[in-house]
Amino acid sequence: MAPPGVPTMAEPAGRARAPRINPELLPAAVVLACAVLLIVASTLLNPGSSFVPQLDAVLVTSIFLVVASFGQGLTILLGGIDLSIGVVVGLAAIMVSTLTNGSNAAILWVVPATLGFAAFIGLVNGLGVALARVPPFIMTLASGISFYGVGLAFTTGLAQRPVAPGLVALMNARVAGVPIPVLILLGFVIIATIFQNGTSDGRKLYALGSSPGAARVLGLPIAGLNILVYTLSGLCAGISGILLAGYSSAATIDIGDPLLLPTIAAVVIGGARVVGGRGIYLGTFAGALFLSALETIITVLNLSQGVRDIIEGAIIVFALLLQSERWRVARG
Amino acid sequence: MNSTPPVLEVRGISKHYGATVALRDVSFVLNAGEVCGLLGENGAGKSTLVKTLSGVEVPDTGALFLAGSEYRPRDRNDARRQGVATAFQELSLVSTLSVAVNLFLPDPAVNRAGLVAMRQLERQAARILAAHGVSEIDPAALVGDLALGQRQRLEIVRAMFRRPRLLLLDEPTAALSDRDWLFDLVGNRLAEGTAILYISHKLDEIRRLCRRSVILRNGQKVLDRPVAEMSDDEIFRSMAGRSVVERFVAAPSALRADAQPALRASHLSSDGLEDISFTLMAGEILGVAGLEGQGQARLFRSLVGLYPLRSGRIEVASDGRMVRPQRSPRAARAAGVVLVPEERKTEGIFKDLTTIANVSLPAIDHASKLHFLSRRRERALVGQVIGDVDLPEHFLPLSIAALSGGNQQKAVLGRALMARARCLLLFDPTRGVDVGAKQSIYRMMRAFVGGGGAILFYSTELDELVHLCDRCLVLYGNRIVGELQGPALSQELVLSVAAGHGLERAAVSGR
């Protein structure tokens, strides 16, 4: 006798039941919890600090990574990669500081121009990948190197220019006690999530990343989607560069280089599949936050950069191992 | 006749892939200096048998004996070492390496420095090729640069020149124009005492070369007799199987007398398609029959722009006129032509998406306002088609990868309906699909043409073609060699025409 309320299983039982929560939320939640734990740990390790300011600090320093890795996440979702992100961040930062040259009045046209330029680099990447069929890592690496050269040519011999004070102020101001960058960050995460999981374009991106062959047979706009994604990635790197310039109040051309590998790491740690088709932005966000918290704790512990790199590398390998395990179970 | 053991003895081997039985208790022997034909329809188990003998697959049960001692090859190289060479149908050459290196793979001779002595290898290769009557292939050329026919010759020479005890030739003439070249070589090998298993579905070749033939059907051996004792009809009947299970409910054709063309192909030619012309009418299920690799896949793909055409014209009905859509899957879909492809796993389903997302994809823009998805509208749209393909609603939120092959196929068909197709190109839609889902697919097809749609339908299962189609085109050697309808549309005749036979007869009884 079955107890009341227990449904009698119809045919392909068990697996025919819908998962209650999105299975991709799980890695995101776990990574997010780890990030919070790291922040708590760094608070405890640093006598005299408390949790909320520590959290604010991590969030503010994470924003560059959070923004840039959205673009990286999209390219990886399509089975590609964007290796020009570091260069674009640096170019955007140097462009915004050189052109504003300490004047607030210039912000109004400099910021859009900078974003346009960053998106243009992304567009070039997208055209190369989608139309010329250059493998993404070659295309983005090559365009990164080339545009870096262009940037060098323009900035050689120039004295470092100060960033417009308005941008610097933006990165340091608070509204109702909350740092403005944190608000920007939250807004960005919401918009990015809606784009990726709440729009028809996002759905097509998942479809294309999941089964390029089926996308071709169905006639999805494959070239258009690729161009869109690389352009967005350039744009995000541009936003990240402008914020970074404001945060550090001056810019050098290679200011963005240390961001490139962490963008990839954030996506992977967040549970996205390296070859595309799977992954949510919340996971990438958690990954970026985790990496920033790790950075903070390493600073607090006074460990060397080398140690940080070792830990980061180990975490990526670990995340990949977890993925392959999951993959095997899913198939079995 | 004599006491020496046969070169090959196959004793009761079986092989399963999941739930599909590829071989069931197959036994036969092969003697030295004998060439034995192996006949069967697509999916009868011929390729599985070749794979088992050549060390690619291990049988589940049963045993193989080579000259009396048990033969259990670990892999292809092990099989070759034991004297079993295979010329594979899908050609096992490495296209980025030269002809000479390919000939001596997997272990080309190395010099004292451990390097492959290329010049020497090429001289040797030239000698071997010449000895096998091949003069037009440059040993230094890359295999990827060779024409398909040349590659097939190379594959055959590679299997032959090591003087194997047992030689397996799997559809060796599929891309060969000069068959006599092969027949001469086969004769030479036989004179040397090699035993040859000759896999083909071309009956004339079997008749010409083999004294004896084994026929497989559904993984079982149904016949093992001297070829001369059997008539063509007898052979085709045993290949196709007599007893067709009555699982087709007779239904009147949806084709009306005043039907208008839905799709017209005129003189399509391409690399691997020769002057194909046909007209598909609204309300018609037009079958396409053909043995493997006769151009059917290229034809279906070319109709939606996935395979380039050299010349020809494709017209699609649109508002009472015939228009010529651009050759891309996107333009074809806009014109109402949707392909349900052969490779369900890589080209049919989007494996990481849920079932509902798989079905709704063509209409996803209709389910969104200003690009923002409305799950409610998506659900409503999908709800309109899943009934037509018998896809249970509770599968919708699941990942499509968790569904059975049959339900995946229903989702793919549902997606084609979602795309508002008026002309469906179904390429073997019932392959790997359970019986219940097959019935659903048949029902869906009939309902679709009943509503004025048109279907071009390729199937490897002849009974499906015979029972569902109004007409059936038969492809052979990349061209249409016959068109059967009415009483002429029988399994035996389809198979016979598909094997390149009985063309005159087909034309006669086709009227």
Image (cartoon, rainbow, N blue to C red):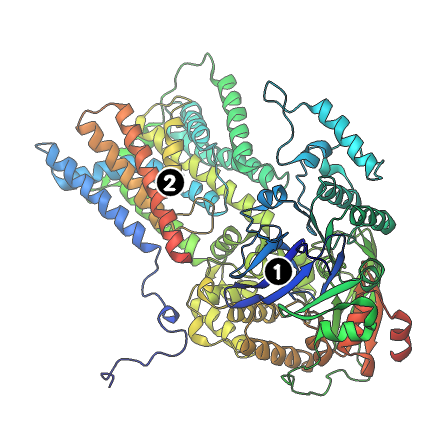
Question: What residue did someone put label 2 on?
Answer: A67
Question: What is the three-letter code of the residue carrying label 2?
Answer: Val
Spot occupied by residue A10 in the image (x, y as percentages of width and height): 38, 79
Q: Nearer the viewer, residue B400 or B124?
A: B124
Answer whether residue A162 is visible to the viewer in this image. Answer: yes
Q: Residue at x 63, y 62 (%)?
A: B341
Task: Answer with left or right where residue B57 lies relative to residue B322.
Answer: left
- Image quadrant of residue B480? bottom right
B203 and B439: which one is in front?
A: B203
Q: Residue furthest top?
A: A157
**Residue under circle 1?**
B10
Q: Position of residue A259 (x, y in %)?
A: 37, 31
Q: Residues within 10 Å of mark 1 (few under 14, many from 20)?
A: some
Occupied quadrant, residue A184:
top left
Numbered disc in front, either 1 or 2: 1
Name the kind of residue labelled 1 in the image.
Val
Answer above or below: position of A144 versus A271: above
Q: Is residue A308 above or below residue B494?
A: above
Would residue B3 appear left or right of B474 to someone viewing this image?
Answer: left
